[in-house]
Amino acid sequence: MDIVSIIKKKRDKQALTKEEIYFFIEGVTNGTIPDYQISALLMAIVLNGMNEEETFYLTEAMMKSGDILDLSEVEGFKCDKHSTGGVGDKITMIIAPLAASLGIKVPMFSGPGLGHTGGTTDKLDSIPGFKTLLTEDEFIESLKKVGIANSIQSKNITPADKKLYALRDVTGTVESIPLITASIMSKKLACGADGLVLDVKFGKGAFMKTKESAEILAKSLLKMAPVRGIKAVALIDDMNEPLGYNIGNALEIIETFEVLKGKKVHDLLEVSVEIVKQMLILSGDGENAEERIYKAIEDGSALKKYTEWIEFSGGNPEVINDYSLFPSCENKLEIKSEQRGYVKEINSYNLGMAGVYLKAGRLKKEDKIDYGAGIVLNKKVGDFVEKGETLLTMYFNDTRIPLNEIEALVKQSFEFSKEEVSKTKRIHNVIR
């Protein structure tokens, strides 16, 4: 068996065998296949696709390329959650304490943000002292004691994916359902959970632009659950406007505190409650799920669990009640509406990029970010606005591009209507 024959086979639109796929991933992992041949096969896969069986074996081989976390010593149902990324997506920090307060164990690996979508690690890093890199022992201890464990992914988890992802990023081979599926699911399956809720987003601020393409990806992801025999479900979630009101790391953490203190942010609650409900259903404990979820917010048990998580992770729990402990910004700029009417659209991609330009996110992996920077929306889709009323406020110390260009981008993000507009419906479908 040799890599040239495998490349030619996929070039000629033939299906690869399990042995050929394992041979490829082993060569990627141990460095015996050079980058130019890896890239050639990746491009052949992008152009000619993979069937379900090939994708299954690719996912399995990538999962087995490194360590598979053993969480068997942790009692209870362990359920992970994965989002395909969006703007203002702070859902992890709401659902983790909510689910844990209801007895679900929530193990999660996350990473930093890049481009218009923020990263969970960056958001948690904005909490003074919070430790986002845990050893395996610390991860398991956190899961046992708090019911939540979140860490930057270990170097030993799916090393093949790290190599492939880096090459796909620079060779125009990102857009492939089989490659995306194997990348996401190999990591998730290696992390030892019993269940997985997939939050697959579509729209201007998402990787998948249409509901139909999001459903295709969701179905592909779900078909990989048998690789490790886990239970899984997928939500199809609208990301045409930002989630919640706050965009930026510390600002988003503050909003998660507010939601768990009882603030009614309708879209954050819609998505968070549905995810936790699906976690409970997967665990076999779905009776009266919504009622119990709202009760965990109302009686303070979810916020108490959040406090425990911060404390165990070395963070300062006082931030929950004293927001002045977060990083802050010297400058702010209010953007006023230039017309009267109902907000018809808010372009989440544009606002995500505006956040990047304010240094709340990164253009390149090595970019430093400002944890206090970001945007706070005053208006959402469906809200009525008077001319001269504030649409949003930008917070910043410095910017990556001239401020007037950011201001212009933000103003272009809003569309208005003279007629009433409905609020954005977030969850469009649940796929099992």
Image (spheres, rainbow, N blue to C red):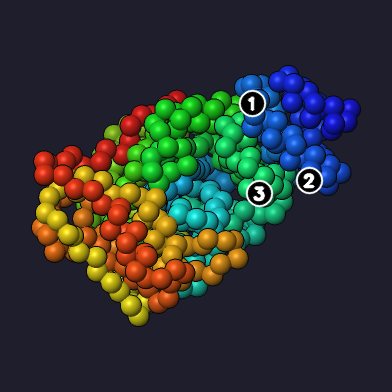
Q: Tell me how far mark 1 sits from mark 3, CA to CA.
A: 19 Å
172 or 277: which is nearer to us? 172
Q: In terms of sequence position, does the residue under pointer 2 or pointer 1 come before the other?
A: 2
The residue pinned by badge 3 equals 170
Q: Helix, strand or loop at disc 2?
A: helix
- Location of residue 211 in the rendering, given as x and y in whole percent from the top left corner: 39, 31
Q: Is residue 281 above or below residue 92?
A: above
Q: In terms of sequence position, does the residue under pointer 2 or pointer 3 come before the other?
A: 2
The residue pinned by badge 2 equals 35
At horizontal 68% and vertical 30% (from top left) the residue drawn is 45
Q: Is residue 268 above or below residue 400?
A: above
Q: Amino acid at mark 1?
A: Gly
- Quadrant in the picture for residue 253: bottom left
Judged from this view, the residue extending furthest toward the top is: 14
At horizontal 34% and vertical 43% (from top left) the residue drawn is 240
Q: Is residue 309 above or below residue 242?
A: below
